Image (tube, rainbow, N blue to C red):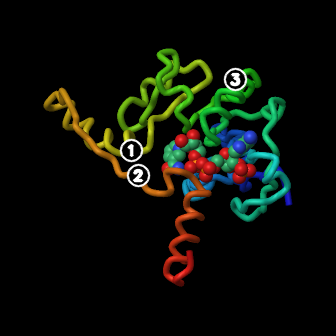
Amino acid sequence: MNAVVQPPVNEASNPATRNVAIVGATGAVGIEILKCLEDRNFPTRSLRLFASPRSAGKTLPFRNSQVVIEALTQECFKGIDIALFSAGSGISKEFAPAAVAAGAVVVDNSSAFRMDANIPLVVPEINSAALTEHHGIVANPNCVAIIACVPLWPIHKHNRIRRIIASSYQAASGAGAAAMADLRDSTQAHLEGRE
Ligand SMILES: NC(=O)c1ccc[n+]([C@@H]2O[C@H](COP(=O)([O-])OP(=O)(O)OC[C@H]3O[C@@H](n4cnc5c(N)ncnc54)[C@H](OP(=O)(O)O)[C@@H]3O)[C@@H](O)[C@H]2O)c1
């Protein structure tokens, strides 16, 4: 077991290869980020996984290794090139500045920086050019907004959309891993005739 995953041999010489960290790696979003890195064969020189002290010492699989989860600290970002944050807005506000100070680019999935005029809010399919304007942090929108904007953008380019009236019905997963477990457990209890 390792806190740092070594890259496949053909990645070691790839200049795009990066030291990557996931903050909130054990969460509903963090687990999906981990799967995306693996499915897309993202060129990682090393991968570090951070979560709360509750998860420190547990492991998650990545490629052919088990990666040890570390407790998040202000000092943990040394050597990280890209830090993918999904541990809630409070954690992002508290720890993203330390990641940037250590030289990392932060991609933040929380709401912490979405309304900050100095931080680009990016959906790659729509405004990837804004990535060139970041000062260390890149925000992304709410999950419903991202998915709605992708098909609306080409329509907007041809026929300007003035107003959108939308209702969104969030899945239990939108409230995180604990809500998904609660839905599963309470559904099972209901089907078994329990409280
Ligand atoms: N769920 C979605 O569909 C979705 C979509 C887009 C964006 N987001 C945003 O992404 C963020 C995470 O959402 P989620 O659904 O993945 O939540 P979640 O399942 O509750 O996961 C929260 C993560 O944050 C970690 N964490 C909690 N307290 C911490 C602390 N003090 N120090 C370090 N790590 C800590 C947890 O670690 P432990 O396991 O150790 O507690 C876990 O890894 C939120 O800001 C959310 O708004 C969510």
Residue at numbered disc 2: 170
Residue 117 visible at all: yes
Residue at numbered disc 3: 97
Amino acid on which the number 3 mark rests in the picture:
Pro
Residue behind label 2 places its C-beta within 8 angstroms of ligand 1: yes
Q: Are marks 2 and 1 in contact (CB under 8 Å)?
A: yes
Categorize mark 2 by other alpha carbons within 10 Å: few (<14), some (14-19), many (20+).
few
Q: Residue at x 77, y 62 (%)?
A: 65
Q: With respect to residue 72, does 61 lie above or below?
A: below
Q: Are marks 3 and 1 in contact (CB under 8 Å)?
A: no
Which callout, 3 or 2, points to the residue nearer the camera?
Answer: 2
Circle 3 sits in a helix, a strand or a loop, which is it? Answer: helix
Circle 1 sits in a helix, a strand or a loop, which is it? Answer: helix
User: What x and y, as percent, mark residue 192?
Assistant: 53, 84
Q: CA distance from mark 3 to mark 2?
A: 30 Å
Q: Is residue 87 left or right of residue 188?
A: right
Residue at numbered disc 1: 144
Q: Residue at x 35, y 34 (%)?
A: 126
Q: CA distance from mark 3 to mark 1?
A: 27 Å
Closer to the camera in the image, 129 or 54? 54
